[in-house]
Image (cartoon, rainbow, N blue to C red):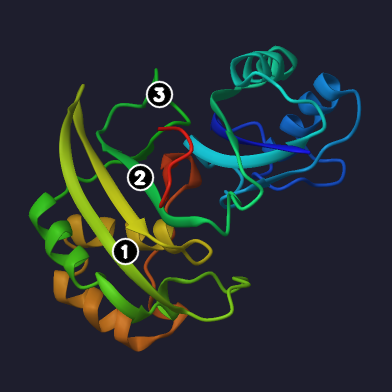
Amino acid sequence: MHRYALKIEYNGAPYHGWQRQVDLPSVQGMIEQAIGKVAGSAHEIAAAGRTDAGVHAWAQVAHVDMERDWDTFRLSEAINYHLKPNPIAIIGCAKVTEAFHARFSAVERRYIFRMVSRRAPIVHEAGLVWQVKPPLSLEAMQEGAKHLLGYHDFTTFRSSICQGLTPFKTLDRLDVSEHPYPGGAEFRFDVRARSFLHNQVRSFVGTLERVGAGHLEPSDVKRRLEACARSACGPVSAPHGLYLAGVGYEDDPFE
C-alpha cells in the first residue's frame, strides 16, 4: 500500500460537516466517492479534524492508502476531476510513509474566523463571513482575548455535546485584527492550538463579539472562563465565518 497526504479546500455550505454520514452529504463522503472512482474500489480517508456543518477549509489535511503507486500530481488531478461540481478541491498531494497520520501526527491546528460589521447585507461573500451590525471595538476584543491564552479548563467554551475526554486545553494564539471591508469592517480571529474542543472557536468569537459591541467588559471574559460553566458562555457564532486554515506537522509533507 502507498500512503498519500491530501491538502483539501472546501466550501462547507452544502454539507452536513466533514464526517461521512448515512444519506446526508458530507465532505468526507464526497472525497471518498471520488477516490473510489479513481481507484475502482472503496477507500476511506482519515482527516486532521472534523469540521461542523457550514464550516469551510482552506487547508484541511487527510491521508489515504492506495494500492497503486501514483504520481502525486496525477492523483490530485484525477480526484479533482471526479469531485466536480462539488466545491471541494485537492490543492496539495504528497507521498508519505505509513508513520504519517493526518490526525495523530498533527502538532497544531489553525483556524481563521471572519466576522464583518456593517449595516448593509453581505452580497458577494454571503455564507462566507459572519455578519454583525453593531460597530465593534478592536481594542476591547484584543484585551478580552488575552484572558483565553494558555492552559485552562475551557468548559465554558465547550459544546454540551463535546466528546473530548477533558476540557483542559492549551490555547497558543488568539489574535484579533481589523481589515477594510466595503461599507464596514472585517475582524479576523487567528486561533491556534494543538487541538480544540467542539465549538470552542465559535464560542470564543461569540463572546468576544459581545465584548466588542460593549455588552461585556474585557475582564468579563476571564470571569466567564473561570466559571467553568457552559451557561457562562456568550452566544455561539455562526459556522459560516469559520475556516480550518492549516494543520501543522513536525515534518510538513507538503513542503
Q: Earlier in the sequence, mark 2 or mark 3?
A: 2
Q: Residue at x 48, y 31 (%)?
A: 127
Give yes or no for contact between labels 2 and 1 (Cβ–Cβ under 8 Å): no
Q: Earlier in the sequence, mark 1 or mark 3?
A: 3
Mark 2 packing: few (<14 Cα in 10 Å), some, or many (20+)? many
Q: Is residue 35 above or below residue 3?
A: above
* Residue closer to the observer: 248 or 140: 248
Report the Cα–Cα distance between label 2 and label 3: 14 Å
Residue 141 relative to residue 127: left or right: left
Give yes or no for contact between labels 1 and 3 (Cβ–Cβ under 8 Å): no
Report the Cα–Cα distance between label 2 and label 1: 13 Å
Number of marks in the image? 3
> Helix or strand or loop: what does disc 3 sit on?
loop
Residue 107 relative to residue 217: left or right: right
Name the residue tied to disc 1.
Answer: 207
Instruction: Specify the amino acid type for callout 1.
Output: Thr
* Residue closer to the observer: 254 or 38: 254
> Helix or strand or loop: what does disc 2 sit on?
strand
Q: Is residue 14 above or below residue 135?
A: above
> Helix or strand or loop: what does disc 1 sit on?
helix
Q: Residue at x 24, y 69 (%)?
A: 149
Name the residue tied to disc 2.
Answer: 113
Name the residue tied to disc 3.
Answer: 125
Q: Quadrant of residue 229?
A: bottom left
Is residue 26 visible in this depiction of the protein? Answer: no
Residue 111 relative to residue 56: left or right: left
**Whole-percent x, y for residue 213 in the image:** 20, 55
Report the Cα–Cα distance between label 1 and label 3: 23 Å
**Whole-percent x, y for residue 157 in the image:** 42, 71
Q: Residue at x 63, y 72 (%)?
A: 163
Residue at the farthest right position: 41
